[in-house]
Image: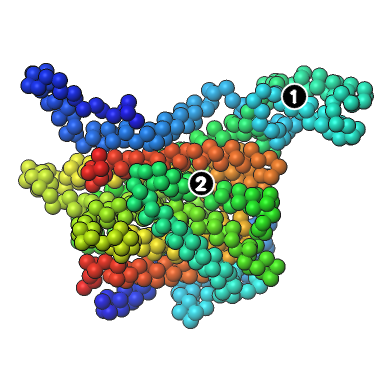
Amino acid sequence: MKSTEIKEPVITSVGSDNTDNILAEEAVKGGSLTKDAMRRLRKNKIAIIGLWIVGLYIILAITAPILPIHSFSDQVLSHQNLRPSLTKTAGQLLVESRIKSLMQQENVAEVSMLSRAAVSNYTEYSEMLALEERNLNGKLVMVNNRRYILGVDDLGRDVLARVIYGSQISIAVGIFGAITSVFIGTIIGAISGYVGGRTDYIIMRIVDVMYGLPYMLLVIMLMSIFGRNIFNLFLALALVSWLTTARVVRGQIMSLKNSLFVESARSMGASNLRIVFIHLIPNTLTVIIIFVTLGVPAFILTESFLSYLGLGVSAPYTSWGALVRDGVPSMSVYPWRLLVPSAAMVIFLFSMNFIGDGLRDALDPQDKKNL
Amino acid sequence: MKVYAIKRVLGLIPTIFVIISISFAMLHLAPGDPFSSERPIPPEVRANLEAKYGLDKSPVIQYFNYVGRLLHGDLGLSIFYKDYTVTEYILKSLPTSLTLGGLAMVLALSLGVTVGVLAALFKNTYIDYSLMGIAITGISIPLFVIGPVLQYVFALKLGLLPTSGWLSSINGWSAVIMPVVTLAFIYFAEIARITRGSILEVLKSDYIRTARAKGLSTRVVVVRHTLKGGLLPIVSFMGPTLASILTGSVVVEQIFRVPGIGRYFVESALHRDYFLLLGIVVIYAALLVVFNLIVDLLYVFLDPRIDYK
């Protein structure tokens, strides 16, 4: 906390030119609203940690194809539901379970008590496993030397790879969805607030009615009209979630449009379009940024909700929600299949929410008293 | 005030009709129809089926037929579930959803407001941080993770509560606990956050300073002065939320096998069960506009500065 705080200039010798310069510089720096906000954001430790975590997630999602992980779609059926292990390879885990079943058959408590036949049986088995090659996408792979640090799912696919590739879709839907919806909301809200009168009335009635339509119904309808794919998914989400942004931006524009700087811009001959896009919308940037950051986790949640109901992404692609849905039925036997994607998703959403809250606190000038 | 209320009530009717019309149009624009399935049905059978449900006419006539019947209180027949009429399905499942949603809302409100006020009063202390940490957890964890985890812990491991189901002679109210808690959790989080923010705002205002200057105890200042003003954002949040929570959270009903209306909602959309889906939309829209109206009227009682004239 302390290291990130900007230190007040220490005045050592009162009146010296040097100090005055520093003070003047500080004053100039402190004057900018953005800098002020950045400073307050930097003070917010949790938000900064959140920022780092989100950055890491995004880097992992983007670099997924070059990361040293297994394929997210190749199925190794003999590896079904292997437990997560940092140290043991898939082959070793298979041998382990083989020994366990042999011990059960012979009713003994220790490996050393196994009969000779059983021992030779499992030695043979482990030798066979070590050399086994499988053709995956035209490449021969010694599959049993693989390690699955986060376990395997019911079709023999690496959970780690699936979570990383799933994050690609979840994060993309979140970011693009939030940006698209805020974009639509800002434009419509700005026009409605600036033009006013009948246009405003009609647009706001449309918004009211759309609030009345069940959100899920709209999304389900849009998905079935345009077909199920990822692009349509986020488009459908964006099309029905711009309403709140539009309302808030409209309110902001309405309170700004009579201010002096708009009047002076108009007196200098600026067109309406220019006033709206160059002068007014940048002034609502605070709201826009907050809506985007808080929109991302909301979109990810909605996407996962749709995937959970079976309306989201389709196989072999996956998302966090789809992974969670796959994990739920077997949670008492293979808990990692539920816990790994849930944890990945919850940590990300957690971080995004903290960033959103931090930004809101930092950008909200009303709270300045509490600096 | 009375004039305003009457005006608003009359204004509800066109809103509901616009919602119904849009839903109707979207349903007919969507590709596929109730009878398109994996197994194609013979054209003669299809024609008969369409005639039975009145789907052989043009969409415009269908629309007027539907609205005409709706005005008589007839919601039509379900195409996919052939045993009952839409009205019967809704009457059968809506009370369950209303109970689930109502209980969840009561729980979420009482906990959320308490937590929010506490966090605001102890701003930037560890009490605040931990309470808000819990609230953000609530917003970040999807329902369909909380539900199964609760099931796993309380039903499978501890054996305290039944895994799923709803009020019945065998389980009594014990089956109600987990669905209600699960559903309440996300709303609790949302309410706690909004309460904290608005209470902080109110605490800064002049009338609170006046109340303090008068020498009133903290308890009186908080309960009588701050809460009343601080609850306005909660009230406006409640309007749309009540409608959606009461018409049943699809996911909670699915996880805990609660026989509510949410189940029919998704299934009817997937099966293109026109009349059942429209029936649910009608109920939802009616609830929504009524709750919004109540919220607007409540404002006047909570904040004397608001005046509808």
x and y percentages locating residue B129 in the rendered image: 40, 43
Mark 1 and mark 2 in contact? Answer it, CB < 8 Å.
no
Inspect the image, locate mark 2, and give the three-letter code of the amino acid beneath it: Ile
Check the residue under mark 1 and report the chain it is in.
Answer: A
Residue depicted at x 36% and y 63% = B235
Q: Is residue B60 left or right of residue A29?
A: right
Numbered disc 2: secondary structure: loop
Residue found at the far bottom of this picture: B72
Inspect the image, locate mark 1, and give the three-letter code of the amino acid beneath it: Gln
Residue A183, quarter of the rendered image: top left
Q: Is residue B253 left or right of residue A225?
A: right
Estimate how packed mark 1 is, as few (under 14), some (14 to 19) or many (20 or more) residues with alpha carbons within 10 Å: some
Q: Which residue is mark 1?
A: A92
Q: Nearer the viewer, residue A94 or A314?
A: A94
Q: Label 1 vs label 2: CA separation?
A: 35 Å
Q: Indicate the quadrant containing the N terminus of chain B: top left, top right, bottom left or bottom right.
A: bottom left
Residue A135, quarter of the rendered image: top right
x and y percentages locating residue B88 in the rendered image: 59, 75
Residue depicted at x 44% and y 52% = B189
x and y percentages locating residue B242 in the rendered image: 44, 64
Q: Which residue is mark 2?
A: B141
Residue depicted at x 79% and y 26% = A95
